[in-house]
Image (cartoon, grey):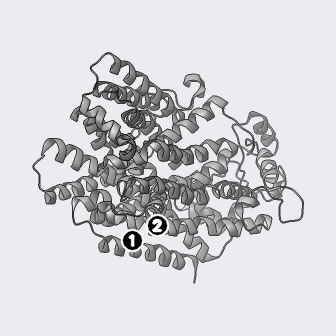
């Protein structure tokens, strides 16, 4: 069978599996819709959490980020995994013991205020919508390539699939669908990595292959070969740090606390049977996530090396060293059709010159070769994982497996995010504040309508993203870090924190982070509205927008602390509630 037939079979088969699961586990009550009936086991919940977590950013964009940033992408690996340690130690068991459907419900009860609950809903929607943009971008990239349609058409197909199984099944359907999606995506990510590691280094484990010598007998290490190939063309070294230590620290911290503050991740720990299961779920989730995250650096490095050596076929500067455009491989032509890879023959020699024209030193050298600019005018980072098996000429079934995995990763997280938005609107706004007497049937219908509206908004924004998937997701983490995490942490560990402090803190942290992102990134739906585009010299203390969530969290905490000290303390029943959440019953009696 040819590659396209394999793709239709694997992607179509996985869709059929998801839809069957959604129908079989259809939500029949609000309890099923919001928290899957509260009866999910820790291993199953850990696997579902891993799928919920390992989005298009992890599967599609993480390795692409590493491929082009190298060492400088390490904060994403550390931050996105380290956040689960914070969840296990500081939040998951306490929030599960409280026994709520949603994060805003906890905030509203803990801070005895519907205003606090409303502000939490706003923060949740802003962070979740930003996050889901990245997922829809990933959906469009995956569908665009493997169904051979335009990027925008790919997004619309993804919207339709999510609509069917997420709106129908709610949390119950999403949970069991995500277990299936995890199995698909983890095989799809690791199997090609094993093949390519064997090709390049002869070592089957990609984690070890990354630090091994090339299989060609040269004795050169893979990373050494990669550094040579890219620096010869004016690109930054793969293994050399670029950003300041402060910026790396702030980005890692922002991603960690952003992870611990993401509503669609936290809500997963409301689905288990008991408090101990919540902590176990985090451990299992971290284990399942680590399988992919320890493989991603090898995938990124190997993908970049394969891409560069495909285009640059010989020594730099020699005419024979550049690939003839007319002889470009089939995968190149296919990705050109998506618009995510583009070539422009600037010197009319019919060959592909791919180099860093922004490097003044190499640009001068390149002009001596008759090169008139970088001719790979578009190389979207999000294509690297999906194109890697094709570049390496792996079997058709492996390429198709990657297609199914990329789609599974994007859809699983999109569904979780949309459910978080839907439950915030239907349960926290409608049921808890605007219409308390609404029937369970009508509340369930409202939740499905809210999710439908969220899918439409997410689809539109996914077609007009402000950056590549992992970059957009990093911004979402900053928003969650600056608005939600501090108020949850203080809500559990500070009896003195009151509603006035929580409300002021959330608004201050969110406003500061949104303002910083607006200044340097612009509004998501109006390209070119950033005030200082690509001007890192204007960054506060050299901190990039993706790292500012940690600063926003500090602003949130400081404002909340100061306001709480000049306003009345929480009522005694609230302090008793915190004591009950934090201290086990037997210990409290003793």
Please state the horizontal and vertical placement of residue 221, each as a whole percent of the image: 83, 55
Q: Secondary structure at mark 1?
A: helix
Residue 70: x and y in percent read 69, 46
Is the residue under label 1 in contact with that under label 2 (CB below 8 Å)?
A: yes
Residue at 55% in and 60% down: 288
Residue highlighted by disc 1: 18
Query: Between residues 498 and 140, which one lies in front from this camera angle?
Result: 498
Quadrant of residue 527 within the rendered picture: top left
At 64% from the left and 56% from the top, the residue drawn is 294
Residue 157 falls in which quadrant of the image?
bottom left
Between the residue at mark 2 and the residue at mark 1, the CA separation in whole angstroms equals 8 Å
x and y, in percent, of residue 325 in the image: 69, 61
Against 463, residue 248 (above or below) is: above
Circle number at residue 263? none
Other residues around mark 2 within 10 Å, as few (<14) / some (14–19) / many (≥20): many
The answer to whether one can see residue 589 in this image is yes
- Outermost residue toward the front? 590
Callout 1 environment at 10 Å: few (<14), some (14 to 19), or many (20+)?
Answer: many
Is 72 situated above or below 316? above
Is residue 144 visible in the rendered structure shown here?
Answer: no
Which one is in front, 175 or 535?
A: 175
Q: Is residue 193 left or right of residue 39?
A: right
Q: Which mark is residue 181?
A: 2
Q: Is residue 464 above or below residue 203?
A: above
Q: Quadrant of residue 452?
A: bottom left
Return the disc, 2 or 1, that comes first in the chain's sequence.
1
């Amino acid at each position: 069978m040819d590659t396209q037939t394999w793709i239709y079979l694997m992607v179509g088969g996985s869709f059929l599996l998801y839809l069957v699961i959604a129908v079989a586990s259809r939500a029949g009550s609000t309890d099923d819709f919001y928290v899957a009936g509260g009866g999910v086991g820790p291993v199953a919940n850990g696997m579902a959490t891993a799928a919920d977590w390992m989005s298009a950013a992890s599967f599609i964009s993480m390795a692409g980020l590493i491929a082009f940033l190298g060492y400088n992408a390490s904060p994403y690996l550390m931050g996105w995994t380290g956040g689960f340690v914070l969840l296990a130690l500081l939040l998951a068991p306490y929030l599960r013991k409280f026994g709520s459907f949603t994060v805003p419900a906890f905030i509203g009860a803990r801070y005895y205020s519907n205003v606090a609950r409303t502000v939490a809903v706003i923060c949740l929607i802003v962070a979740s919508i930003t996050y889901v943009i990245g997922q829809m971008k990933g959906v469009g990239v995956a569908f665009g390539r493997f169904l051979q349609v335009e990027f925008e058409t790919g997004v619309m197909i993804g919207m339709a699939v999510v609509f069917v199984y997420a709106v129908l099944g709610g949390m119950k359907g999403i949970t069991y669908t995500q277990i299936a999606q995890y199995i698909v995506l983890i095989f799809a990510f690791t199997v090609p990595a094993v093949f390519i590691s064997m090709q390049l280094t002869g070592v089957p484990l990609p984690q070890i292959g990354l630090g091994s010598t090339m299989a060609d007998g040269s004795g050169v290490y893979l990373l050494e070969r990669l550094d040579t190939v890219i620096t010869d063309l004016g690109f930054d070294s793969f293994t050399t740090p670029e950003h300041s230590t402060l910026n790396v620290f702030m980005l890692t911290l922002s991603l960690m606390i952003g992870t611990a503050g993401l509503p669609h991740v936290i809500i997963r720990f409301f689905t288990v049977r008991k408090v101990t299961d919540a902590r176990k779920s985090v451990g299992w989730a971290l284990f399942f996530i680590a399988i992919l995250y320890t493989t991603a650096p090898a995938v990124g490095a190997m993908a970049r090396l394969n891409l560069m050596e495909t285009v640059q076929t010989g020594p730099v500067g020699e005419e024979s060293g550049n690939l003839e455009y007319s002889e470009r491989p089939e995968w190149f032509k296919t990705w050109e059709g998506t618009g995510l890879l583009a070539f422009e023959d600037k010197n009319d020699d019919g060959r592909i010159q791919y180099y860093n024209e922004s490097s003044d030193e190499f640009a001068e050298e390149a002009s001596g070769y008759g090169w008139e600019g970088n001719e790979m005018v578009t190389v979207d980072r999000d294509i690297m994982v999906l194109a890697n098996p094709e570049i390496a000429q792996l079997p058709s079934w492996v390429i198709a497996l990657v297609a199914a995995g990329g789609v599974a990763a994007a859809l699983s997280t999109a569904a979780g995010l949309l459910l978080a938005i839907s439950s915030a609107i239907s349960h926290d706004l409608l049921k808890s504040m605007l219409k308390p007497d609404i029937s369970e049937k009508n509340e369930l219908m409202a939740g499905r309508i809210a999710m439908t509206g969220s899918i439409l908004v997410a689809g539109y924004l996914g077609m007009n993203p402000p950056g590549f998937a992992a970059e957009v997701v990093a911004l979402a983490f900053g928003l969650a870090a600056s608005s939600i995490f501090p108020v949850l942490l203080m809500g559990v560990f500070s009896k003195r924190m009151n509603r006035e402090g929580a409300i002021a803190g959330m608004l201050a942290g969110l406003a500061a982070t949104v303002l910083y992102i607006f200044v340097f990134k612009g509004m998501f739906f109006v390209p070119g509205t950033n005030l200082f585009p690509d001007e890192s010299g204007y960054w506060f203390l050299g901190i990039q927008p993706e790292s500012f969530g940690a600063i926003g969290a500090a602003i949130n905490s400081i404002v909340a602390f100061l306001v709480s000290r000049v306003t009345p303390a929480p009522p005694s029943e609230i302090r008793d509630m915190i004591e009950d959440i934090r201290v086990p019953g037997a210990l409290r009696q003793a």
